[in-house]
Amino acid sequence: MCDSYINLEMNNIAKEHLCCAISDKKHQHGVDEKRSWLAERIFEGHVFRKLDAKGKVFIEYAPLETAWVPVNGENYLYIYCFWVSGRFKSKGHGKDLLEYCIEDGKRRRKSGICVMSSKKKTPFLTDKKYMLKYGFEVVDTIDDYELLALSFDGTKPIFMDSARKQEIDTKELTIYYSKQCPYIPNCIEQVKKFCQTNNTPLNLIEVNTLKKAKSVPCVFNNYAVFYEGRFKMVHLLNEGYLKKKVLV
């Protein structure tokens, strides 16, 4: 494709849009939070590459050693988010972005690329079927969640031991979250409001350091929900989804 793409850098991060929450005013606080979070990651080799257009077309990845996820591996890149939506679908953008990431990994002499997915297509996670077409394979599994990897040298990353727990001591609704996704702050506010109105105990745990992210007691890309001591999902919650899928 001949379309132009942009990598967010310190000289343009303040003026460029962040794609996923581009047109929704209620998420603008989250955009500001994400912009600040991202600015701190750029010097770690974090990449946010997007189409130079007003749309949701981007890939975001980072060195696994500094990626805020409970995944362990040496010299890998980890894909946080990979999204092509709306009128931009079926135009080769996904191919362009993923191939850029793969070639970037090879240029950096990385051992491979990895990403969290699931056995069935799940919102907020990369589509497994698409990644398999590019040579990714399942290298580790926790229940319905899978770690996919494209290895350049035969080595493979794995989930941290802590992620295999999938349970915590407290029974109350508990949410682990980071500011990596601009949708999260608004979702947290919706959950807080619902829980206050309905006298539902709520425990919010902000994952605000790399150390915390590497030791979350479940699979975690930027958000994780527990209820009655058991891990439920990585799906971001609004009030409706909370009542329908968690508090049942």
Image (tube, helix red, strand yellow):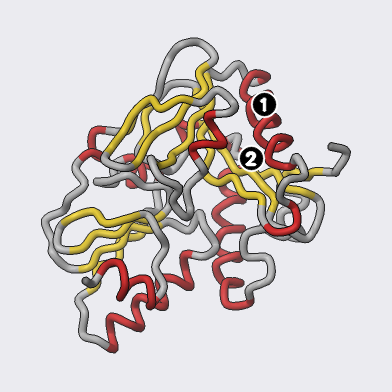
SS at mark 1 in the image: helix
- Locate residue 187, reporting x and y percent: 44, 71
Which kind of residue does numbered mark 2 sit on? Val
- From the viewer's perspective, is residue 3 above or below residue 13? above
**Can residue 9 be seen in the rendering of this structure?**
no
Residue at x 47% of width, y 39% of height: 67
Q: Which residue is mark 2?
A: 47
Which mark, residue 104?
Answer: 1
Where residue 210 appears, as percent x and y from the top left, is 40, 43
Q: Looking at the image, is 145 positioned above or below residue 75?
A: below
Residue 192, image x, y percentages:
34, 78
* Closer-to-camera residue (211/199): 199
Q: Quadrant of the N terminus?
A: top right
Residue 34 in the image: above or below residue 65: below
Looking at the image, the residue that sits furthest to the bottom is: 197
Report the amino acid beneath label 1.
Asp
The disc, 2 or 1, on the residue closer to the chain's N-terminal end is 2
Where's residue 186, x and y in %?
48, 73
Q: Residue at x 47, y 48 (%)?
A: 125
Is 228 displayed left or right of 63 in the figure? left
**Disc 2 to disc 1: CB gap under 8 Å:** yes
Residue at image position (57%, 39%) is 61
